[in-house]
Image (cartoon, rainbow, N blue to C red):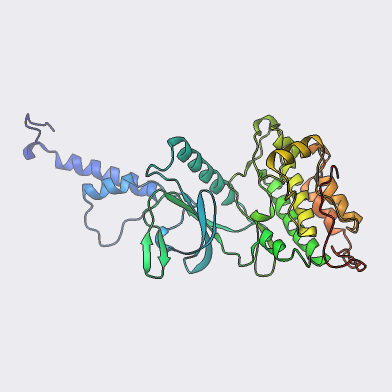
Amino acid sequence: MKESSDGFVRADQIDLKRLDEQLERHLNRVLTMEGNTKREGDDCVTSTTINNTSSKKEREDWEIDPSKLVIKSVLARGTFGTVHRGVYDAQDVAVKLLDWGEEGNRTDAEIASLRSAFVQEVAVWHKLDHPNVTKFIGATMGSSELRIQTENGQIGMPSSVCCVVVEYLPGGALKSYLIKNRRRKLPFKVVIQLALDLARGLSYLHMQKIVHRDVKTENMLLDKSRTVKIADFGVARVEASNPNDMTGETGTLGYMAPEVLNGNPYNRKCDVYSFGICLWEIYCCEMPYPDLTFSEVTSAVVRQNLRPEIPRWCPSALANVMKRCWDANPDKRPEMDEVVSMIEAIDTSKGGGMIPSDQQQGCFCFRRHRGP
């Protein structure tokens, strides 16, 4: 088939039979790759259809169908996005929207970093299946088909927005639940139940070679029966076989292990340390180090062995779990499956609540303390 000098092709020089064979082979390859079947009643496929089909990428197993998602009211706002209520395929869901800001609001490096974090979160989360891990439903990586439901109808979202869709948990964040109970505290049985849920979820993650790296009560959600489920895998990653490959200050102040604060290599034991802080927080319904600055906490935790003060009436078995988990030496911290066994063995039939019977309501134990 030759092209004339003016750019047109002469019809009498077109090998129609050969062209049909080429198109048929091309179409078969496209249909096989896309996993589609030919629709009944289609008598012909034009070259335009072929080109459109071949330009579509194969859908990842974690990708949702954006046309089935309706995004509603805002549940929470963060630095890079928002969490909304939503409905996906008739199921109540929570939708985490991340705005990449490709319209010029962020640099290319920032956008690349956000993309990487999104892909990493999805890659970790979609493979997990445990009653104490928030159920991952799906995600989409930039789609003009996203819609937000408003009182005046639906509005479209820019293609720079991606989202993660997970089960909706009506109990909200564990941190909010603890704040609500700050004055009256929690019954000891409830403390142990919450602690066990979190410990079992972390034990499962570690068995899957996943290090969460941001264990804190704000990232733990409650369902309607008050079961704790781990959420937010934005900084989680597969544990490196060489600890030297995992460095950097990743996490949240107050929960970060000394080796993380110090920029030293670390492993899954950084989650164990964070769990120890969360366990203290669940028991006391207080936030760790509320009056200290970042530099003060960093210096005191690393150099002076600063830890939250354990109330004197805390049962020794529970206090022992806290102390072992937040030991300065990662090698001395227990594995999470051992933590589960230690908490399961705690007797909840003899009280052990935050407020002893001879103590007035309220707690006066939260002052600066230089050591466990």
In this rendering, is residue 309 above or below 356? above
Q: Residue at x 64, y 40 (%)?
A: 250
Q: Quadrant of the N terminus?
A: top left
Q: Residue at x 39, y 43 (%)?
A: 102
Q: Quadrant of the C terminus?
A: top right
- Residue 344 % position (x, y): 83, 59
Q: Is residue 13 left or right of residue 288?
A: left
- Residue 67 % position (x, y): 39, 61
- Residue 172 % position (x, y): 63, 63
In this rendering, is residue 338 above or below 170? above
**From where the camera sits, is residue 7 visible?**
yes
Say which of 262 and 303 sits in front. Answer: 303
Q: Is residue 342 left or right of residue 176?
A: right
Say which of 231 and 251 sits in front. Answer: 251
**From where the camera sits, is residue 131 visible?**
no
For the image, the number of numbered tags is 0
In this rendering, is residue 227 above or below 58? below
Q: Residue at x 75, y 63 (%)?
A: 182
Say which of 13 and 129 sits in front. Answer: 129
Q: Is residue 20 left or right of residue 33?
A: left
